[in-house]
Amino acid sequence: MTSRAPSNMLDPAGHQPAWIDGCSPQPGQLARVHLRSTADIAAVEAWDPALLLPGASIYDCIRASALRSPDKPAIVHLKSAEASDVPTVISYRSLLASIEQAARLFRSIAGDTRSSVSIILPMLPEALIAAWGGATAGIANPINPYLETRQIASIMNAAKATVLVTTTGKYGAGAWDRLDAIKALVPTLQRVLIVGSDDAAHDFSAAIAAQPTGLDFAPPSDPFAEAVYLPTGGTTAAPKLVRMNHRGQLLAAWIMGALADPSSDGVVGHAMPNFHVGGGVILSLRAMLYGQTLLTLTTDGFRSPAVVRNFWEIARRHRVSSLIATPATAAAILALPPEVTSAGHCIKSFNAGGSTIPVELLRAFHARYGIWLRELWGMSEIQGAVSGHLDDGTQPVAGSVGRCLPWHPVHAIEVDASNQLLRICAPGERGVLAIGGPNVTPGYVDASLDGEFFVKGMPGSLRWANTGDLGTVDANGFIWLFGRAKDVIIRGGHNIDPMMIEEVLVCHPSVQIAAAVGRPDSAKGEMPIAYVQFKEGQSASRDELLALCKERVQERAAVPVDVIALPQIPMTAVGKINKPALRLITMRSVAVEEAEKILAGCGSCEVSVDESGKRPSVVIKARVPAARVEELDGKLRNRFRDYEFLTVIELKAAG
């Protein structure tokens, strides 16, 4: 990558990207280009990313947008999915002033220590103001409100939080209901600010309004200064905190805009939570960088059935031009009644991420609505998206997550147990996927985790990340995912890709979404099992779905041993299928089945899952005849010794 390039720079094949609105790369100006071909990507990669951005920091770039169009709506927040509810509208002028006031307040609270602002909020404008004010003053630390108290405290302690911005139960249940317990566990915390508080002394909006506008300190000038500590990982152990910097977030936002919609008049549909890289960076920050309007689809986003039900009405009314959703959300939109029409919408780009788009969903969505779902692939550790499908007017390559986005090559590799490169796989060969490039995080807040993330021994000077995703890069540069390494079902040494089961089940006309996981098995380790959620008002029998799998699942070993219908497949707060939760449901089910066989007729039995440790464990509690405690305890221990999951057995004498 060169440090500079003249305005007429061509790539080696003589291609020049079509810089729009006269916005070619130059210092202090936002460069705008719509990436539609691999030639566009190659030409863009000839430039220093610094020349594409109007400033070094998040604050600088939002300020540049505010100076261009101070009275333009920056954020439109829908209070509900109903047209009768007047939304909250915040102009760029007001947004910038609030960010400055928040940054001043956070700095004053921190005093001589580094400001670190933890944010536990639903999708409210104040969450973004606190995040960008926090990143201007020091560190912002958005946190999932639905984590357990000790997980939240662990995150805040790792971030050395000086301020917490949260709310009250007016937005439903969440961590704000446990404030006293959280505060008691975080000794660095100096102040709690409440969005929507009835007490002006603690109200976030009142506190920042009391501050003068403008900054009384210089905003960050180092583009690589840390800006955000973003938790990532599962919900069964303390999440890891990714160190994110100004340049990484801004470049990720720029890339996403160039892929989806680089216009200044775009309206970005915002329905992914701000504590996730999708909501916080590639939707929200992207909209601010490009001077667009961010339309927040209520505090619940696509978790709200009303938002899904009224999606096309909202899209038409507010002229949404681009958005991102999970495949599960797209499936819910596709399942809307036949009388619901998309006519009159302005959507140019509908990206999907978080899990693979089933081929049947891709084609059916286009057939009904005339829109191609274009799959993205990214992660918090890359600060945004790393691959996607270019909108060249043709159907996306079904099943692929697209090609590498600028500056971020991807290889399938083989590594040893210490994450040392053994070899780079040939095109089309499966391996673990590794990503290189400037947006790869400098590391985790807990540096002891870096070794298992950074690949050692890769050629060149880039940082390379081990994604943990299994996949391949084909001869045409398309990336194919075969699931997380931890999601692969291992049946007696046979590796099964869950997607080959899920793709078959969603072809059934009554199935809205499907998820396959491994069912613990004493002989084979795991056996494939599938869960389905039906479309509203529809159903199918277990035998019918099993027969479909036997007919169409390509590998005999991958045919599921059971298909279970759930009223609602568990989802993460981002809207992805929560496979860890399904694995816990399955693990408990197996434990109940086995325990009841041994304890039949011997008393009551209670089976639960303990998630407090690094690995979840099954806890079996029972009251049995005193004379049989030792015998039954031994039988249970012998039986569960054949399973890989942890088991805690607590038998007590009845009476």
Image: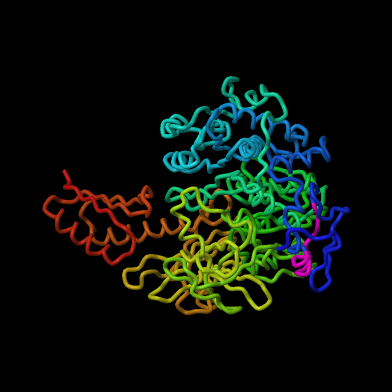
70, 84: nearer the viewer: 70
Residue 256 x/y as whole percent: 71, 56
Residue 435 x/y as whole percent: 59, 64
**Based on the displayed image, in which of its 4 quarters is residue 215 positioned?**
top right
Please, which residue is most extreme toward the front here? 3
257, 62: nearer the viewer: 62
Residue drawn at point x = 68 percent, y = 38 percent:
80
Left or right of residue 559: residue 300: right
Q: Is 385 a magenta residue?
A: no
Q: Which residues are the magenta region?
A: 31-43
Residue drawn at point x = 70 percent, y = 66 percent:
364
> From this viewpoint, is residue 144 visible?
yes
132, 507: nearer the viewer: 132
Residue drawn at point x = 83 percent, y = 60 percent:
6
Please, which residue is most extreme toward the left here? 627
**Based on the displayed image, in which of its 4 quarters is residue 459 positioned?**
bottom right
Left or right of residue 173: residue 335: right
Above or below, 54 against 185 in this view is below
Residue 246 x/y as whole percent: 65, 47
> From this viewpoint, is residue 331 visible?
no
Residue 628 x/y as whole percent: 14, 55
Quadrant of the drawing holding the C terminus? top left
Left or right of residue 628: residue 516: right
269, 283: nearer the viewer: 283
